[in-house]
Image (tube, rainbow, N blue to C red):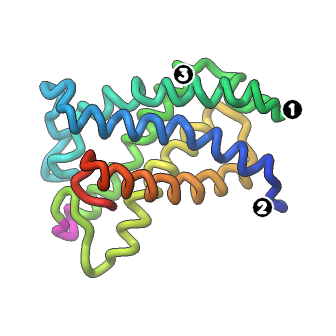
Amino acid sequence: MITSIHSANFIRAFLLSLPLIVGGILHMVAVKADILSYLKKPIHQSLFGANKTWRGFFIMPLATWPGVLLAQYIEVVVDLNTPLLTTTSSWLLAIYLGYGYCLAELPNSFLKRRLGIKEGLTSDRFKWTFIILDQADSAIGCMVAYKFLVDISWTDFWLTIILGTLIHLVFNILLFKAKIRKNPY
């Protein structure tokens, strides 16, 4: 049951989102720079398309780790009175979050391939549904991963999904404007 939302909930939601923000940005930089190109092999092209590759599963846990460290540091500085991220190993969090991020994107890609939507594009028919789903899928996957490792309230769980989805959308637009992403959504 969702209780009233306080500023501490927003701080926790931001801290929970921070590893995903850092990981997502570093992943896009790695894709743009074509780092580890030998891992740029589709997991299963007909099921998920050409953009879901083994490289993401290798890079995301590594790319998420600096964000975990930053969030853990901020958590100590802010002192929320109830440790959230500092109770778990940074590497374990990064591995769970990196794989949660990648795995959660697969059902959306599978659905889009079944509907005939090309990789990297959004359907005109269900445009806003897919734009939101494209931003929310990784946040949902990461929150499920967090639930295995960290004691998170359901208020923080849902608030982080909403905040993470909005942050993901804003950063995708910024990365598009910086010519790191091919499209804004």
Judged left or right of residue 113, residue 103 is right
Q: Residues within 10 Å of mark 3 (few under 14, many from 20)?
A: some
Determine the CA span between mark 3 and mark 2: 28 Å
For the residue marked with disc 3, what is the amino acid? Leu
Q: Residue at x 52, y 30 (%)?
A: 67
The percent position of residue 144, horizontal first and vertical second, equals 56, 44
- Residue 81's mark? 1
- Residue 2's mark? 2
Check contact, mark 1 vs mark 2: CB within 8 A: no
Q: Residue at x 46, y 53 (%)?
A: 168
Q: Which residues are magenta?
A: 113-117
Disc with the residue nearer the chain's start (3 vs 1):
1
Q: Residue at x 25, y 59 (%)?
A: 183
- Residue 136's mark? none
Question: Does 115 appear in magenta?
Answer: yes
Name the element at disc 3. helix
Q: Is residue 109 above or below residue 29?
A: below
Determine the CA span between mark 3 and mark 1: 22 Å
Q: Is residue 66 above or below residue 122?
A: above
Disc with the residue nearer the chain's start (3 vs 2):
2
Q: Residue at x 22, y 38 (%)?
A: 32
Q: Residues within 10 Å of mark 1 (few under 14, many from 20)?
A: few
Q: Which residue is mark 3?
A: 92
- For the N terminus, the quadrant is bottom right
Q: Main secondary structure of the magenta part?
A: loop
Judged left or right of residue 85, residue 48 is left
Q: Is residue 98 above or below residue 153?
A: above
